[in-house]
Amino acid sequence: MNISLILVGKTDLEYIKNGIEIFVGRLSHYINFDIKVITDIKNKKNLSLENQKNEEGVLIIKNLNKDDFIVLLDENGTTYSSELFAEYINSKMISGIKRLVFIVGGPYGFSNEVYKIANQKISLSKMTFSHQMVRLIFIEQLYRAFTILNNEPYHHK
């Protein structure tokens, strides 16, 4: 199985970029993992929020395959503890899914079309994080899940 993370907009903050690089490097020991960054919409100041989400949605959908299992990182999604998220990842790995795709949308969420094609929504927390921080937090949790699955000492109870 491959895991992909699709992001709307580039990561601007250097300390977050550095953290992402660290955890992507660590993840490479466990799984094929890649990040696809969708360029910010041009002239978005001239677009309504709905039109902005729709244009981002078109670009997101262009990066998906018909057999992908699509998970939106969304504030209204299911929440997991780190241990349960590890079990979730394990269940997807043994299910025969070829590519598990997690998506972080733009600042206003996802278009209706993206919501329609998603298989699931996951929330990282009841708290709100910046879209920059979510990237690092999610990748760290994915790494943590693999260390839990491999009984490695990174995660402490």
Image: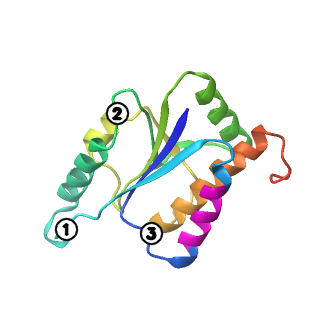
Give the Cα distance between marks 3 and 2: 24 Å
| Residue 130 visible in this rendered orientation of the protein | no
Check the picture and name the quadrant holding the N terminus.
top right
Q: Earlier in the sequence, mark 3 or mark 2?
A: 3
Where residue 64 sits in the image (x, y, percent)?
Answer: 34, 38
Check disc 1 and give the amino acid type. Lys
Check disc 3 and give the amino acid type. Thr
Which residues are the magenta region?
16-25
Look at 77% across and 43% down and name the residue there: 148
Q: Is residue 69 magenta?
A: no
Look at 58% across and 76% down and name the residue there: 15
State the SS at label 3. Answer: loop
Tell me whether circle 3 and circle 2 mark residues in contact (CB < 8 Å): no
Mark 3 lies on residue: 11
Density class for disc 2 (Cα within 10 Å; few <14, some 14-19, many ≥20) is few
Give the Cα distance between marks 2 and 1: 25 Å
Q: How many marks?
A: 3
Is residue 20 placed above or below 12 in the rendered structure? above
Mark 1 lies on residue: 42
